[in-house]
Amino acid sequence: MPNVFRTFQARLIASIICCLPIAANAQQLSQTDWEGEWLAEGTLFRIGVKVEDGILKVSQLESMGQIWSNEDGQIDGNVANVQVDYAGASGIIQAELINADTAVLFAASCQPDFMVVCVLSKDRQAVFRKVNSPALESDQLSVDN
């Protein structure tokens, strides 16, 4: 497997399983800052995010041919957790909103741990940049990905 593919796959996996960095200097953020269209840095991978009654709803916009599904996410301040299933693996993506336009994501868990996607996502993170705001219309976001 070429190194470029492994790097891409690791970023993709970390991206879709929803951030862990330095929030000590984070500005005051609100739940509406999560909303919008987000692009994984260095890729074409895009997701739509909407918040309804404190629940994070993630929609696939450009999955680059990858098939994955997710549950609604839970928000706690500037951190969100989303259950994701991909390529026979299941895990939690943790996202941290650094500012209103930047989020960092990593796989907080991935099972079974012997799966290639879990091995490749271990100790990796992906940076997402907001490319479209305000949030997409609710009919563009699918609850049943």
Image (cartoon, helix red, strand yellow):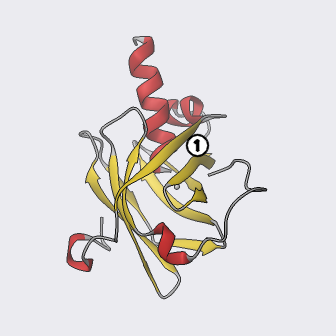
Q: Quadrant of residue 95?
A: bottom right
Residue visible at 49% across and 31% down in the picture: 10
Q: Percent position (x, y) of residue 26?
A: 70, 60
Q: Is residue 56 above or below residue 102?
A: below
In terms of depth relative to the viewer, which is nearer, 15 or 88?
A: 15
Q: Percent position (x, y) of residue 48?
A: 34, 62
Which quarter of the image is occupied by the N terminus? Answer: top left
Residue visible at 41% across and 47% down in the picture: 86
Residue situated furthest left in the rendering: 139
Q: Is residue 138 above or below residue 42?
A: below
Residue visible at 62% across and 38% down in the picture: 113
Q: Percent position (x, y) of residue 116?
A: 51, 29
Say left or right for 54 vs 29.
Answer: left
In terms of depth relative to the viewer, which is nearer, 111 or 140?
A: 140
Q: Is residue 59 above or below residue 131?
A: below
**Callout 1 secondary element:** loop
Residue visible at 48% across and 67% down in the picture: 34
